[in-house]
Image (tube, grey):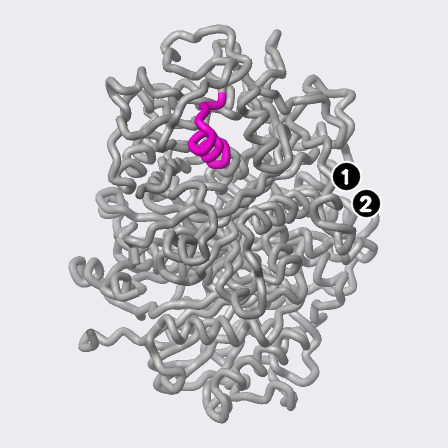
Amino acid sequence: MSDFKKRRIVVTGLGIISSIGIGKDAFWKNAIAGKSGISEITTFDTSGYLVHKGGQIKDFSTEEFIDKRKLKYVGRASQLAVAAAKLALEDAKLSRSYLSRHNAGVNMGTTMGETQWIEEIDTVWATSGSEKVRIEPIYEYPPYALTSNVAMEFKLTGPNFIFTTACAAGNYAIGYAYDLLQAGKADLMLAGGSDALSRIAFTGFSRLAAVAPEKCQPFDKNRKGMMVGEGAAVLVLETLENALKRKASIYAEILGYGLSCDDYSMMITIEEGMRFAMGEAIKESGIDKNEVDYISAHGTGTPQNDKEECAAVRNVFGERAKEIPLTSLKSMLGHTMGAASAIEALACCLTVKDDIIPPTINYETPDPECNLDHVPNTGRKQKINIALNNAYAFGSNNSCLVIKKYDERSQ
Amino acid sequence: MLNKRIVITGIGVISPIGIGKDKYWQSLFEGKSGIKPITLFDVSGLKVRTGGEISNFNPKEILGDSNLRTLDRATLLLASSTKLAIDDAKLEINKENNRQIGVSVGTTFGSLNSISEFDKASVTDGPRYVNPSVFPNTVFNSPASQLSIRFHIKGFNTTISSGMCAGLDAIDYARDFLYRGRAKTIICGAVEEFCIQTFLGFYKLNYLAGLKNNSEPVSCPFDKRRNGIVFSEGATTLMLESLDDASFRKTKIYTEILGIGSYFDPYRLTKYNPEGKGMKQAMHLALKDAGLSPQDIGCVFANANSTQDADKFETQAVKDVFGSYADKIPIVAVKSMLGETFSTGGGLAVIAAIGGINNGFIPPTINYKKKDLGLDLDYVPNKARKFNINTAMVNTFGQNGWNKSLIIGRRKK
């Protein structure tokens, strides 16, 4: 392991497209203020469903980010990804010419891929027959379109991985970018996640009665489920050496991560694997668990997930669990699927940089089975040195990423 | 540690030319074609009616009777190849070691049929009447995650969906995870299923052989008559571990992974770069990673899939990378027998290369009849060659920018 630890990996750029703000400043201001991004869904007709709300992004004008001629075929998940990548690169003050002179790559995570293209194909097929399906969406529906489009846009020739590990995919993408940088396989990586609002996910989760009708209430006793959302976040990761050389401003340092999978069920994540992933992440980071100051929860707002996650946090941290803020951004954004853990990782970077914790909104009634410090409804100023970013997924996939305040004095 | 040596200790393959490694290698040696009339869905009104369907696949024979009902075809294919690989590696999975076994899978279209059928049902029947038991199949990682459930594997579980390079990407990722000690053993899979959605997609894009005027629906890489891919399916699973661990448990070792090279060529999402820059870079970087020179490679298992550009550009790239040695090195396209299996292509080629190295033969490029201008390397036409090779390069080059080459070799003493 020591070979890898020679290189410290830092975050030097943040880009985000979310239902509570485009760009990190707007997003962060609203996240701290506890603003909800939930509204009536207009992306597709919800009249046949029992629920109608979700975390749709309504003020995103694609033309600002992508050549208009490309919009005929570039799908929405790619649009969000390219836009978030563009913002991240601007934030990191990285020019296209700098990128062309360095070994830069891109890792992205997604749950549904170009879901809206698949849905267009399905709708036409189901109502008018397969021969009526347009050609363009066929080219661009495979999930690889996401990282392909980002790499094509910014001419990135380095590592390029598209992770489809469902709702934890962002953490997988960021984690492996960290690995690639530590191994010297890239100078610089864009890493994150993207998902467009998915009718397929909305159908499935609502059929399982797992969607809350009005609001997402993680950790609340009366929580009624998750809400389907959309978004994208991209982080610029590079070696500390590279960042210092180009005098970049540094948000945070990535210390390591842990992954696990359970053999219990496709749809239910359980305490055991969550605990194991946190344990692995802490071990790899070389920190003591008593140093963890904050946890960004997976916190979907389903009865099962939140209960299991709180149990896992209790089992990892013991008595100290109550003192560690455990909050869920999904209370504001809903579940942005493969983007969720990337957005949450981005928020963790800002938390450790600014010493501010965004709240868990819609929190009304404590649940004895959760009942940790969920920072209810109002953001909090608190010194945070080390944050964990939990993300779990369909298929019982568990992940945990460790993010630390950047300290120029430490070795 | 980066100097950890990584070896392949188990093989499972479900292919149109054979189920299980021995049958697969035998068919490769005989130059058998896996292309046959399509029976899985109705193709009666279409111009192309053949493909690499695995017609004798009976998952119950491999997996037993239980808990198969809700699984889609891709999941059944991958679970089957994985069962064969676990048995082949004599890997015992138990409570003591199951957190140290990881899963790394490449698949791109594997869940598409499940996704699309679920969605179409919501359009025609209404969203409140879809079958919730098939919803778990609508994520790309469901084949991989079902491996954890079925075989009680609790280490990391990752799915990569980069198209034609996904199989080798999964191996690349697995190798890095072994280097870092994130797992001791990795089940490294790839799968695509034969489904109407993907078939019709490529049909509509005019990407299949037999669609253009007077063209034949045949997979004939490097041949002048080549005119598109023959759509196909398959699943492969390789068991990866460090040489130290494999030696410790005294298991048989097939080959060692010697080097991997990757390069993203940001040219077009749907076209190969005519300069073959990415292809050349991937091969160069794989050689560099392995510390080998072109003369050390015994055989190239080509990406060539019977499309005009892919086969031509790869031939030129091999000439550029291998220089004067290019004339002497056999370059075979096993896709001539298997068709195009996308994510599984890398896995099928790696297993073909292992068969060649361990059994002393080079599989042929079948259906080779008509020489094309400039495509004049040794493609081992139509008949396998008995020949000892120690190392092989496997190429996978995607039309969407990805390029990946991998070198395996007989374990160095």
In this rendered view, identify the residue nearer to me: A219 or B305. B305
- The residue identified by callout 1 is A126
Estimate how packed mark 2 is, as few (under 14), some (14 to 19) or many (20 or more) residues with alpha carbons within 10 Å: few
Chain of the residue displaying label 1: A
User: Which residue is disc 2 drawn over?
Assistant: B124
Residue A308 lies within the magenta run = no
Please indicate, yes or no, whether residue A134 appears anywhere in the rendered image. no
Do callouts 2 and 1 mark residues in contact (Cβ within 8 Å)?
Answer: yes
Q: Quadrant of the image for the C terminus of chain A?
A: bottom left
Q: Residue at x 64, y 27 (%)?
A: B52
In the picture, measured across the screen, residue B335 lies left or right of residue A190, that is right
**Residue situated furthest left in the rendering:** A245
Instruction: Determine whether, in the image, residue B332 is placed left or right of residue B143.
Output: left
Asked if one can make out residue B30 in the rendered structure from this viewpoint, the answer is yes
Residue B367 pos. (x, y %): 55, 13
Residue type of the residue flagged with mark 2? Thr
Q: How many marks?
A: 2
Q: Of the residues shown, which amino acid type is indicated by label 1?
A: Ala
The residue lying toward the viewer, choosing from A187 and B62, is B62
Quarter occupied by residue A29: bottom left
Q: Is residue A141 above or below residue A289?
A: above
Residue shown at 39% from the left, 15% from the top: B378
What secondary structure prevails in the magenta region? helix
Q: In the structure shown, which secondary structural element does the residue marked by tag 1 occupy?
A: helix
Residue farthest bottom in this picture: A319
Q: Range of the magenta residues?
A: B350-363
Where residue A104 appears, as percent x and y from the top left, is 30, 48
